[in-house]
Structure formats: structure tokens, C-alpha cells
Image (cartoon, rainbow, N blue to C red):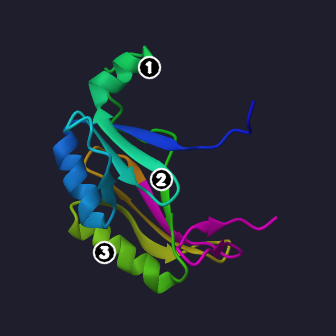
Amino acid sequence: MSDPVLTVVTLGVRDVRVSVAFYEALGFKRKFRATGDEIAFIDAGGVVLALWSWDKLAADAAVDSEPRPQTFRGSTLAWNCRAPEEVDAAYARGIAAGAAPLRPPSKTEYGGYRGYFADPDGHAWEVVCAPGFGFTADGRLVLPD
């Protein structure tokens, strides 16, 4: 058995087309369209972001789709940036794409800088510049040992 590797994060959404438009407006690229508009696969830089009907995803996982949470869901997605100015730009891009503002960018107590917005289905995104994290030439996050 191979070591575990996170390959796909699937988000349950109300409307796949609306969500695709939002993520494309953020700058992500949709790929692999063999399933038509049933499910969308977004290239998220080393991990695939899949967008699928909330109800179909719940049924596939054998869990109830209702009631849908209206509060924090216990997880966030993160967009790491190299500098605070990039955080500000990414946050503004999210809001321009239709995200709901959750927390405007500000300094953290650990020396970083972050802000939060929510996608059209309430999935929380953090845009952050965290000290000690590096990046590859193509923008992928490199964790220190």
C-alpha cells in the first residue's frame, strides 16, 4: 500500500454551473469535462477541487443532506500567498468574483496576515501569508521540516 496523498477535495454545491463560474472568476481552470455539467473538476495546483451537487454527494457518502449547516463547518480551504499584498489582492479577487466577506485581511498574532471569504455555498476560504512557508516556482506550498 502506498503512502496517503490528498488528491481531491469535493465540495457539495447547490448549482454546479454557478460554482464553476465563481471558481473560474477566481482564476482556477476547469479540466476533464467527460461528465458534462454533472460534476466539475478544477485544477487547484496539485490537488483537484471537485464541485458536485450537495444532495448527490451526500447520497454517495450515505449521509443525510439536510439540514444543511448555516454555521461553521469545521473546515476551511486555504490560498497561501507570498506577501501581505498578495493576500489583499486575492481577497479582493474573491469578493469581486461574488464571495461573501467573512473577515477582512489583517495581521495575525503569529506574524502572518490573513483574511476569509465564503464561496456561493458558504465554504470558507482563507487567504494567508504565513511565516516559514516556502513556494516552488509554480506557486505550490513547501512546508518546512
Number of other residues with Cα within 10 Å of mark 1, as a class: few under 14, some 14 to 19, many 20 or more: few
Ranked by sequence position, the earlier of labels 2 and 3 is 2
Instruction: Indicate the secondary structure of the residue bearing disc 2.
Output: strand
Mark earlier in primary sequence (1, 2): 1
125, 104: nearer the viewer: 125
Q: Which residues are magenta?
A: 125-145
Q: Is residue 109 left or right of residue 145?
A: left
Please report contact status of discs 1 and 3: CB closer than 8 Å, yes or no: no
Q: Secondary structure at mark 1?
A: helix
**Residue 136 on the magenta span:** yes
Q: Amino acid at mark 2?
A: Leu
Q: Nearer the viewer, residue 13 or 4?
A: 4
Nearer the observer: mark 1 or 3; the answer is 1
Q: Residue 35: horizontal and vertical position, in percent?
A: 26, 35
Q: Is residue 105 above or below residue 59?
A: below
Judged left or right of residue 123, residue 121 is: left
Alpha carbon distance from label 2 to label 3: 17 Å
The numbered mark at residue 77 is 2
**Residue beneath disc 3:** 92
Tag count in the figure?
A: 3
Q: CA distance from mark 1 to mark 3?
A: 34 Å
Q: Which residue is mark 1?
A: 61
